[in-house]
Amino acid sequence: MDSFFIIAVQTTTIVSAIVIVSVRIEHRLTKVETEINWLKRLVSKNNCCNESEGAK
């Protein structure tokens, strides 16, 4: 009976660690994706402004 309890605790600990690491990775990827989208918008605004100034 004790061995089942020990196995359950070890399994729970391992699964919890995997979940925590997965959530942190997902959060970091979301942050990077947001920054990339922000940079794309910034570049597209600059390109638009530069093209209109060049046409003058």
Image (cartoon, helix red, strand yellow):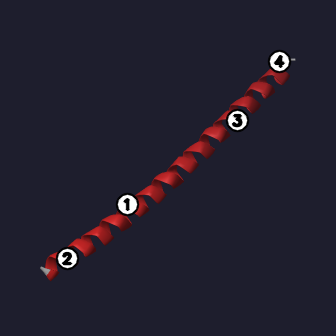
Image point 66% across, 41% down: which residue? 39
Q: Tag 4: residue type?
A: Ala
Q: Position of residue 25 (x, y in %)?
A: 46, 57
Image point 83% across, 23% down: which residue? 54
Image point 73% across, 30% down: which residue? 45
Q: Nearer the viewer, mark 1 or mark 3?
A: 1
Q: Position of residue 29 (x, y in %)?
A: 51, 51
Q: Nearer the viewer, mark 4 or mark 1?
A: 1
Q: Tag 3: residue type?
A: Val
Q: Tag 1: residue type?
A: Val
Residue 19 has which mark? Answer: 1
In the rendered view, does 54 fall on the left or right side of 32? right
In the rendered view, does 4 fall on the left or right side of 10? left
Q: Are marks 2 and 3 in contact (CB under 8 Å)?
A: no
Q: Tag 2: residue type?
A: Phe
| Residue linked to disc 2 | 5
Which quadrant holds the C terminus?
top right
Q: Position of residue 38 (x, y in %)?
A: 65, 40
Q: Are marks 4 and 1 in contact (CB under 8 Å)?
A: no
Check disc 2: other Cα within 10 Å, few if <14, some if 14-19, many if 20+: few
